[in-house]
Amino acid sequence: MAERVDAWGENQKAARRNLPLKRARLQRAYRRAAQVELSRGQDADPGPIRRRLLGKWAGHTRQVHLEQQGGRRERLQNEPRRSAEARARRRATRGRRGDA
């Protein structure tokens, strides 16, 4: 099995904390939907209400991640996000901050 990369920018603590929170939120939504259906009275049928599944998926393999990262880096060098004037202003601003 290939080694996977967490490229979402979150640390592992965030993922460990957020998965149970998401699961609990889905369960609360299910209980609320069932409660609303049961409050209808005699014609209530909570049977078709289903709990939504928690989606989890693996990250990219290290090889795929590095290929994508290289493609992004190459694209940014060929087509920068900002104009040349904006980059020059930013460099000048950074230079002034260093002098002060």
Image: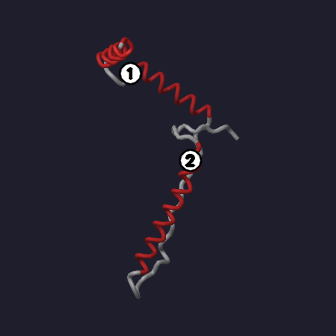
Whole-percent x and y of residue 40? 38, 82
Above or below residue 100? Residue 10 is below
For disc 2, the neighbor class at 10 Å (few under 14, some 14 to 19, many from 20) is few
Q: Quadrant of the C terminus?
A: top left
Res. 61 image quadrant: top right
Disc 1 secondary structure class: loop
* Disc nearest the viewer among 1 and 2: 2
Name the residue tied to disc 1. Answer: 79
Residue at 58 percent of width and 45 percent of height: 13
- The residue lying toward the viewer, choosing from 4 and 17, is 17
- The residues bearing labels 1 and 2 have C-alpha atoms spaced at a distance of 34 Å
For disc 1, the neighbor class at 10 Å (few under 14, some 14 to 19, many from 20) is few
In the picture as drawn, the residue positioned furthest to the bottom comes out as 42
Whole-percent x and y of residue 58? 59, 45
Mark identifier at residue 53: none
Residue at 58 percent of width and 33 percent of height: 64
Residue 30 horizontal side relative to residue 11, left or right:
left
Above or below residue 74? Residue 26 is below
Tell me the amino acid under the disc marked 1: Glu
Name the residue tied to disc 2. Answer: 15
Above or below residue 91? Residue 6 is below
In the picture as drawn, the residue positioned furthest to the front comes out as 100
Tell me the amino acid under the disc marked 2: Ala
Whether label 1 touches label 2, CB < 8 Å:
no
Whole-percent x and y of residue 32? 44, 71
Residue 65 horizontal side relative to residue 80, left or right:
right
Q: Quadrant of the N terminus?
A: top right
